[in-house]
Image (cartoon, grey):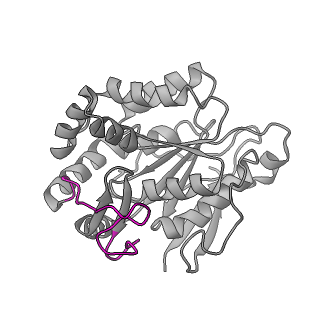
Amino acid sequence: MASLRVLASASHSSLPIGVRSLSSIVPWTLQLPPYMNLSTSEESSTQDKPALRMLLFGKPCSGKGTLAARLSKKYDISTISTGDLLRQHISERTEIGRQAEETVAAGGLLPDGLILDLVTSQLDTLRSKNWILDGFPRTQRQGRLLDIFLEKHNIPLNLVANVDISDDLLLEWVSNRWIHLPSGRVYGTSYNPPKVPGLDDITGEPLTKRPDDNPETFSRRLEYYYAQTSPLLYYYASRAYSTRLVNLQGDPDAAGPMLETIIRGSFPSVRTRIAPSQNSWLSGQLQVRLSLQPSQ
């Protein structure tokens, strides 16, 4: 049974959250503490109802896409997935697609400017809407470039959610992961298995293995994550005056309900698309331990 621990710190009433110094914490040797507001009632009761502008963060293959898809299906939230955008270019055999296919097969990443252009072209159409960004940024430089664009258009990020799963479990998932390439839907033999083995649930088309879904390539991706991507959490922690940072421990089935609670409590502009159902998330209990710590 997965558990999620929420650690909050009190701060000045005008600030969304308080953040203690993280300068002595090494990202890959100690878990980043999660943060959230002590009270979301004040936010919810205000006349200003900000749109959700969320970055979904986590290690490779941690279920970010699955979590984003479920939230987008249930709520009026658009998802901008760099993976989906790149798959579209690959299927259309564009120049970007050909470059992306070669780079992904080698476990690499595309140039910052190219990915930024892909993402910002989508954000331009969602100025006042609720949205989730999945797959970008992946470095502090990319994070700063994204913030420059968002702040220029007065739509800064206001929530960063980190899906925290152990490396060993991720390696197991990758080894048993199957993809429906046209849509990006992900299945596994032990997690989210297809209704019919080897076939996509929606289209019935064959599932395939991604070229980078092997232990060697995944290990390189994980090394890159620890070296380049995980410091982004500390970058966003330093921006706590405007961005809430939460740490979600567990797979999407465990993290989903808690993230829903945070979104509903803090962003009343988010509306439900479909009637709530006990099957919105796979059955199972979620233990939530709230540990409150005064600010220092």
Q: Is residue 214 left or right of residue 284?
A: left
Q: Does any portion of residue 231 appear in the rendered image? A: no
Question: In the picture, residue 188 is in which quadrant?
Answer: bottom left
Residue at 31% over, 52% down: 181
Tally the marks: 0
Range of residues picked out in magenta: 188-213
151 up-or-down from 14: above or below = above
Q: Chief secondary structure of the magenta span?
A: loop
Q: Is residue 296 left or right of residue 230?
A: right
Q: Position of residue 245 (x, y in %)?
A: 56, 48
Residue at 76% over, 48% down: 268
Q: Position of residue 3 (x, y in %)?
A: 52, 73
Q: Position of residue 49 (x, y in %)?
A: 77, 40
Residue at 27% over, 44% down: 227
Question: In the picture, residue 81 is in which quadrant?
Answer: top left
Q: Does any portion of residue 122 appear in the rendered image? A: yes
Q: Is residue 237 left or right of residue 31?
A: right
**Residue placed furthest toward the front:** 204
**Residue placed furthest toward the top:** 152
Residue at 52% over, 38% down: 238
Q: Position of residue 56 (x, y in %)?
A: 49, 48
Identify which residue, 85 or 173, lies in the foreground.
85
Does the segment drawn in magenta span residue 176? no
Identify which residue, 212 or 22, lies in the foreground.
212
274 up-or-down from 153: above or below = below
Identify which residue, 128 or 26, lies in the foreground.
128
Identify which residue, 22 or 176, lies in the foreground.
176
